[in-house]
Image (cartoon, grey):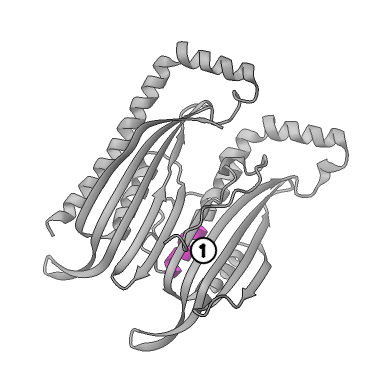
Amino acid sequence: MAERDFVVNGETLTYEGIFRASELLDTIDQWTKRMHYDKKESKALEVVKADGKHIEVMYEPWKDITSYAQKNLSVRVIMHGVKDVNVRKDGHNVVMNQGKVKVIFYGILKTDWEHRWENKPMMFFLRSLYNKFFYNGYVKGWRSEIKSDTHALKNAIKAYLNLNRYR
Amino acid sequence: MSNVYQPPKKVPKNAANENFDGYSVARIAYKGVFDWDAVYKYVMEWFSERKYEFDEDDYKHKEGTKIGIEEELKWKGNRKINAYYRYFITIEVHSWDMRRVEVIENGKKKKLWKGRILMEFYAEVKADWQGIWKNGPLAFELKKFVDQYVHRPERNAVWVDRLYYITYKLQAGVREILKMESKNNAHEHRW
């Protein structure tokens, strides 16, 4: 099992108001594409209820840094009570969504993702020594990259939701 | 909600699908009214247009509950890439509480299905699909060595990556038929 270090652990973003669910999810997908992350969608759940849709999507984009380290982001989007509303924009009627959104962010540094250094006790011990004494600088750099990437994604989502706040 | 979502099943890990960590590549869980016939037709046409050999490996129909029927289906598509690699895409469908409903869409009456559906998409790149290197122990060990150390970078960067995003394109198409909000696929342009 690879080692996972939770650099960003469960930061949340909540929003209630008007937005477009498909555009919000597309914002996240486009961001991962732009930042050259590989796509991974662990969950795509949609339930149509009388009081609106319940949508849960979980993206886990990943990016290999080296053959030893990997960046993993986890973005869980929960949308509750999503209904269609008509909004007047620039003189036109536009169909938007209204509901509650909660986004939970995790930024994870995964090391030894190829499982090469954990098969034998001596290899595991060597890995621990290297991590502690030789790779410290690299690990710090990778952790700060993951933190900045997670916050950049969070800001991209905030920017999109803020655009819709005043509609 | 717990009766709609189920955790993904872990499949045995092998050298061919190691990049997928043994879990399904993509999943869809949906509860509501949808056109099941359109989904069926779309998946068949998708495989046929891309020259995949398509099989419906498993079909189980159960009486289910008083609300509706329960069905389990397993679709498999496979396509030869070259003399050494072959693509396999498996879709496992499980539906619960399925019943026919009549809705009015654009002023016309239409018969659709209402229920819960879970679709899991698995993808695998199979090496040595002809079994040429399985004839003897030496050939088999040589194949293992070549797969692990010689072909691995090319296989992961080209064939596995390609199939990975092709499976997401299929999933995005199914989501569009189901009219889900998460139907967009920003990686549509890949491969």
Query: Where's the C terminus of chain A, which quadrant?
Result: bottom left
In the rendered structure, which segment of residues is drawn in magenta? Answer: B169-178
Query: Where's the N terminus of chain A, which quadrant?
Result: top right
- The residue at 53%/31% (across/down) is A2
Circle 1: element type: strand
Q: Reply yes or no: does residue B176 show up in magenta.
A: yes
Q: Nearer the viewer, residue B88 or B18?
A: B18
Specify whether B142 is left or right of B156: right
On the image, the x and y values in percent for residue B160 come to 59, 44
Badge 1: chain ID = B
- The residue at 57%/50% (across/down) is B163
Residue with the mark numbered 1: B118
Residue at the right extreme of this rendering: B136
Above-or-below relation of B12 to B67: above
Q: Quadrant of residue A10?
A: top left
Magenta stretch: helix, strand or loop mostly:
helix
